[in-house]
Image (spheres, helix red, strand yellow):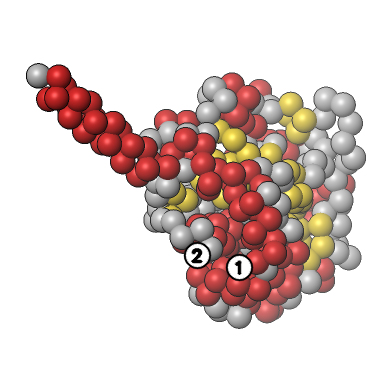
Amino acid sequence: MKLLKSLALSTALIAGSTTAGLTADAKVTISDLTWTGAKAIGFVIQEIITGPMGMEAEIVEGMSDGSIIAAGMDKGDGSIDVYTDFWMPSRAGLWDKYIDGAATVAVNTPYEGTQRIYVPSYMTDKLSSIEDMKKPEVALLFDSDGNGKGEYWAGEIGWKSTKQWKVKFKSYGLDELWEAADITEAAFKGQLKAAYAKGEPALFYRWTPEAMFAEYDLSAIEEPARTEGCEKVDLEAEDWLEVSTFSCASSVASVYVAYSKTLETRNPAVAKMLSNIKLDPSAINAWILSINGDGLDPRDVAQEWVSENMDTVNAWING
């Protein structure tokens, strides 16, 4: 009987050890955000994990909704582990809930990004500031459907930044003269390409780093400087447009790689690597240019960058 108990205990210990070994290098799942910079970051992370680290990583196709990604990281079951391009303060609600609140999501050292509204530079003689936008004759230049309001692109429906720009236009007193065009990013890019080729007006939200600034000569619209209390937004409220105000330039954004803290036990090596990532905006812009400008496959761009920057990669893995 003692022998049987001893054998059973040994078997259990071996099984437990095997399970621990399996979970210690669990497959890592990565978000599939829609903008090129985020996609490039995702493929670089995947390449590091599957290449030098010799582990499994998957970009989960269609996993592009930030709220769903954050909730999945919070759950920590491996359905989604990595949010490749987490913009703050645009995602302050998710930060408060999962990073500062539940403490189930961790982040790396961020890179800096900007968020502005732009026109092609050939339009700056007519529109260069928010004050110019208050002129009816300027707004009419951007009225393509004849309803008396100028159109601008604030982003895709569902983006937090889209809501922010709608709040800004209200706060600047521009609602009577301007309206947001609720179209997809792909449709917007097509419209911009056509407008730029003809020297026609276009007004739109964009961020940096972004390949668009290599394709076109663009100028940011001048906004009032930031002051205390100029930005009070509650984009989660049911009446978010009514209760929010935003009457100044956006702050420089901090952009993170966020990941589920359960990776610290499910795959500690990858969790360590993710915590050590320090992205360079110039590198991200080069990835974007290679993908959008040169038409290269993002997997090839990631593979080439990793192979040529192993000192940086090894610092992330071992740092």
Q: Amino acid at mark 2?
A: Gly
In the rendered view, does 214 fall on the left or right side of 72? right
Residue at far top of view: 1
Residue in view at x 64 percent, y 59 percent: 314
Give the residue number, with chain letter if any, for mark 2: 51
Give the percent coordinates (x, y) of residue 146. 61, 58
* Numbered label tally: 2
Q: Amino acid at mark 1?
A: Val
Residue in view at x 82 percent, y 68 percent: 121
Where, by quadrant of the figure, is residue 170 drawn?
top right
Where, by quadrant of the figure, is residue 168 drawn?
top right
Is there a contact, CB below 8 Å, between mark 1 and mark 2? yes
Residue 40 lies, with reference to residue 158, above or below; the image says below
Residue in view at x 74 percent, y 26 percent: 232
Does residue 291 appear in the picture of this structure? no
Where, by quadrant of the figure, is residue 161 drawn?
top right
Give the residue number, with chain letter if any, for mark 1: 306
Quarter of the N terminus within the rendering: top left
Does residue 77 appear in the picture of this structure? yes
Which numbered disc, 1 or 2, marks the residue that appears first in the sequence? 2
Give the percent coordinates (x, y) of residue 273. 60, 49
Q: Nearer the viewer, residue 314 or 93?
A: 314
- SS state under label 1: helix
- SS state under label 2: loop
Q: Nearer the viewer, residue 138 or 168?
A: 168
Residue in view at x 90 percent, y 40 percent: 225
